[in-house]
Amino acid sequence: MIRILDPTVAAAHAEASLAKRVDDLDGKVLGLLTNSKVNGDVLLALVRDELGRRYRLRDVVTAAKPGASRVADDDLLDTLARSCDVVITAIGD
């Protein structure tokens, strides 16, 4: 007799909502979070430069995860949430 096992499981249902969007970046603090892969910081620098040309940003806060395969720790995310109006993250390579 052959026994076939199905390793898949149904996805857990979770409620989620989109983050509040800002209408404009003028006077806002922009957060940039890289995943620490090669060129992630380069991409975010380009984003910062372009947004800096388009908007009067009040400040830019940069941060990095400890590594691409690790999640950002709660303290880092809390700091970004408290100090930034908008956060953009990027993956390098």
Image: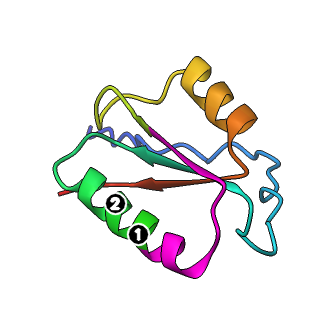
Judging depth in this view, the residue of 75 and 14 nearest the camera is: 75
- Neighbor class of circle 1 (other Cα within 10 Å; few <14, some 14-19, many 20+) is few
- Residue 63: image quadrant is top left
How far is the residue under mark 1 from the one under mark 2?
6 Å
Residue for point 62% across, 35% down: 80
Task: Give the image location of residue 9, x and y in percent.
Answer: 54, 43
- Neighbor class of circle 2 (other Cα within 10 Å; few <14, some 14-19, many 20+) is some
Q: Which mark is residue 29?
A: none
Q: For mark 1, what is the residue?
A: 49
Judging depth in this view, the residue of 4 and 89 nearest the camera is: 89
Location of the N terminus (image quadrant) = top left
- The reply to whether the magenta stretch includes residue 51 is yes
Residue for point 44% across, 64% down: 48
Residue for point 52% across, 72% down: 51
Q: Which residues are magenta?
A: 50-62
- Residue 47: image quadrant is bottom left
Which element carries disc 1, helix, strand or loop?
helix
Q: Residue 27, relative to residue 13: is it above or below?
A: below
Tell me whether the residue at label 1 lies in contact with that at label 2, contact meaning CB atoms closer than 8 angstroms: yes
Number of callouts? 2
Task: Give the image location of residue 37, x and y in percent.
Answer: 22, 45
Amino acid type, label 1: Asp
Q: Residue 12, relative to residue 45: is it above or below?
A: above
Q: For mark 2, what is the residue?
A: 45
